[in-house]
């Protein structure tokens, strides 16, 4: 009985360690990559239009969060221009994902 308990405990520990290591490697890989030649302008935004340009200009998944971490806007961008006129003035975090590479930036709306 004691041997089975010990074997089960060791097996669970091994799976936990392997899972944690795989997640840590995935996070490290995402942190070291940046979207090439990413340009977000104008920042601060005052006219409701934000332009997001990259070297490859592929389809981008855009998420905008408020400072509390609540997602305010989620969309897919096929061109360069995104309409954010419905956002209230303030500071936001914009997350851009292109070609499985994700980058976050600060966004100011006036």
Image (tube, helix red, strand yellow):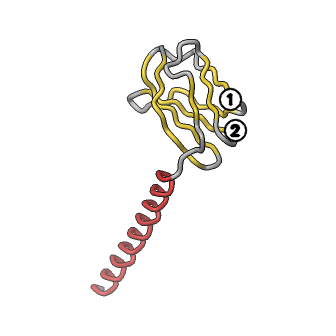
Taking the image as shown, residue 103 lies to the left or right of residue 68, namely right
Q: Residue at x 42, y 33 (%)?
A: 69
**Displayed quadrant of residue 8:** bottom left
Residue 92 in percent (x, y) is at 45, 26
Q: Which residue is mark 1?
A: 80
For the residue pair 53 and 87, the one nearer the viewer reads as: 53
* Label 2: which secondary element: loop
The residue at the point 66 percent across, 41 percent down is: 55
Cβ atoms at labels 1 and 2 below 8 Å apart:
yes
Height in image: 43 above or below 70? above
Q: Residue at x 72, y 30 (%)?
A: 79
Q: Secondary structure at mark 1?
A: loop
Q: Quadrant of the N terminus?
A: bottom left
Q: Is residue 10 left or right of residue 77?
A: left
Give percent across and percent down for residue 75.
Answer: 63, 31
Q: Earlier along the polypeptide chain: callout 1 or callout 2?
A: 2
Label 1 neighbour load within 10 Å: few <14, some 14-19, many 20+: some
| Circle 2 crowding by C-alpha within 10 Å: few under 14, some 14–19, many from 20 | some
Image location of residue 14, percent across then percent down: 39, 75
- How far apart, in angstroms, are the residues tagged by discs 1 and 2? 8 Å
Residue occupying the far left of the picture: 2
Q: How many marks overall?
A: 2
Q: Is residue 17 above or below residue 1?
A: above
Give me the residue at 51% from left, 22% from top.
43
Q: Where in the figure is residue 89, as x and y percent of width and height?
A: 46, 14
Provide the residue designation for mark 2: 57
Nearest the eye: 56 or 72: 56
């Amino acid at each position: 009985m004691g041997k089975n308990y010990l074997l089960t405990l060791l097996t669970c520990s091994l799976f936990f360690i392997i899972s944690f290591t795989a997640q840590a490697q995935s996070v490290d890989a995402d942190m070291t990559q940046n979207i090439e030649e990413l340009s977000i302008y104008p920042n601060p935004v005052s006219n409701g239009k934000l332009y997001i340009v990259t070297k490859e200009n592929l389809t981008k998944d855009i998420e905008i969060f408020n400072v509390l971490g609540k997602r305010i806007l989620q969309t897919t961008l096929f061109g360069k221009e995104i309409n954010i006129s419905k956002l209230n003035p303030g500071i936001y975090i914009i997350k851009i994902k292109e070609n499985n590479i994700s980058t976050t930036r600060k966004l100011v709306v006036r």
